[in-house]
Image: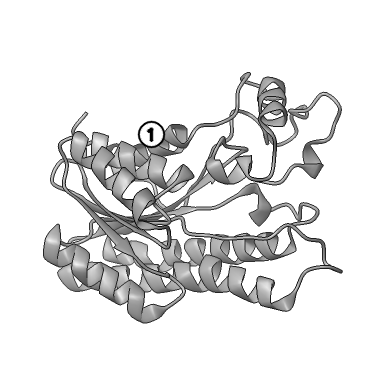
């Protein structure tokens, strides 16, 4: 598939999990990809190597999206090595697992810095360059059911995802006049290394079997949806929220968990 041939994508939080899945699928569709992440060199080198194996250009930048100067430097480096950014994916996030009474302010602050301020920095830096070029572009934000539902023991993540979700919708409302499409991908429970730090393999396998379509989501599922929204096939779509959750959160539908415990699951 070469629907994105000649395009340059920049993916924040792209070294692992959903971000890496998106980066790889964008490359598989023909895009050259810049991955920006705070991960160590091994994780960054691995995803870049996999992108190169697909025959696409790749660049790894170790950076913290909560720092404006690091975002600007990453975008400038991407432009100099791969070309102007046509597709931005804002995926970087962090979180802790604690309820309101136990959440430390510094944890809330740090999650908001990465998950809201980081999204703002990336969107504004890239969008300003897109507007200056006058050729339009695509921005995809990776949201979460936490943007709509205040799951227990995830205060900082709930707050950050809700804020960034509305930031992305605000961007869609304003940037469409410049030919820049902004859409949101909302994953359900996805099998990522991050999830496996919280849950055992046995729990992950059991919960996968309880999902409506019989398995948990994969990073590649989000990647394929990202390719669609970034392509000309979605040229008339902006301000949309596309759920990629295997039916987990169908409005008015049956719970994905026959025991009715979907409200306790964190993503």
Q: Is residue 224 above or below residue 115?
A: above
Q: Residue at x 29, y 36 (%)?
A: 233
Q: Nearer the viewer, residue 87 or 56?
A: 56
- In which image quadrant can residue 23 be found? top left
Q: Which residue is mark 1?
A: 224
Identify the element where label 1 is drawn: helix
Residue 225 position in % (x across, y down): 41, 37
Image quadrant in which the C terminus is located:
top right
Left/right of residue 19 with respect to residue 135 in the rendered view: right
Of 180 and 214, which appears nearest the observer? 214
Inspect this view and state whether residue 234 appears. Answer: no
Callout count: 1
Q: Is residue 43 visible?
A: yes
The residue most toward the bottom is: 69
Residue 121 location in percent, x, y? 41, 74
The colour scheme used here is one colour
- Whether residue 31 sits left or right of residue 234 in the image: it is left
* Residue depicted at x 83% and y 68%: 102
Query: Quick check: 2 above or below 141?
Result: above
| Structural crowding at the residue carrying mark 1, measured as other residues with C-alpha within 10 Å and reported as few (<14), some (14–19) or many (≥20) | some
In front of the other: 255 or 198: 198
Position of residue 31 measured from the top left corner of the image (x, y, whole percent): 21, 44
Above/below status of 153 relative to 124: above
* Residue 165, horizontal then vertical, whole percent: 56, 60
Residue drawn at (46%, 37%), measured in percent from left and top?
Answer: 219
Q: Is residue 241 left or right of residue 15?
A: right
Residue under the point 63% across and 60% down: 95
Quadrant position of the N terminus in the picture: top left
């Amino acid at each position: 598939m070469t629907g994105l041939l000649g395009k340059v994508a920049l993916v924040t939080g792209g070294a692992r999990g959903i971000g890496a899945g998106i980066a790889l699928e964008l490359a598989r569709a023909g895009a050259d990809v810049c991955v920006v992440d705070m991960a160590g060199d091994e994780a960054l080198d691995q995803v870049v190597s996999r992108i190169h194996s697909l025959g696409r250009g790749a660049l790894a930048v170790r950076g913290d999206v909560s720092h404006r100067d690091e975002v600007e430097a990453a975008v400038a480096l991407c432009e100099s090595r791969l070309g102007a950014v046509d597709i931005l994916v804002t995926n970087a996030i962090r979180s802790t697992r604690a309820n309101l009474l136990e959440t430390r302010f510094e944890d809330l602050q740090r999650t908001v810095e990465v998950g809201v301020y980081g999204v703002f920095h990336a969107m504004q830096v890239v969008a300003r360059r897109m507007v200056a070029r006058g050729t339009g572009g695509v921005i995809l934000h990776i949201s979460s059911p936490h943007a709509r539902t205040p799951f227990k023991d995830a205060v900082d993540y709930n707050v950050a995802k809700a804020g960034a979700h509305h930031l992305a919708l605000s961007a869609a409302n304003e940037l469409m006049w410049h030919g820049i499409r902004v859409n949101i991908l909302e994953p359900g429970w996805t099998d990522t290394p991050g999830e496996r730090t919280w849950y055992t393999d046995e729990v992950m396998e059991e919960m996968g079997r309880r999902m409506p379509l019989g398995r948990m989501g994969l990073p590649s599922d989000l990647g394929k949806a990202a390719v669609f929204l970034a392509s000309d096939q979605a040229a008339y779509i902006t301000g949309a929220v596309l759920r990629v959750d295997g039916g987990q959160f169908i409005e008015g539908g049956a719970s994905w968990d026959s025991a009715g415990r979907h409200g306790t699951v964190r993503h």
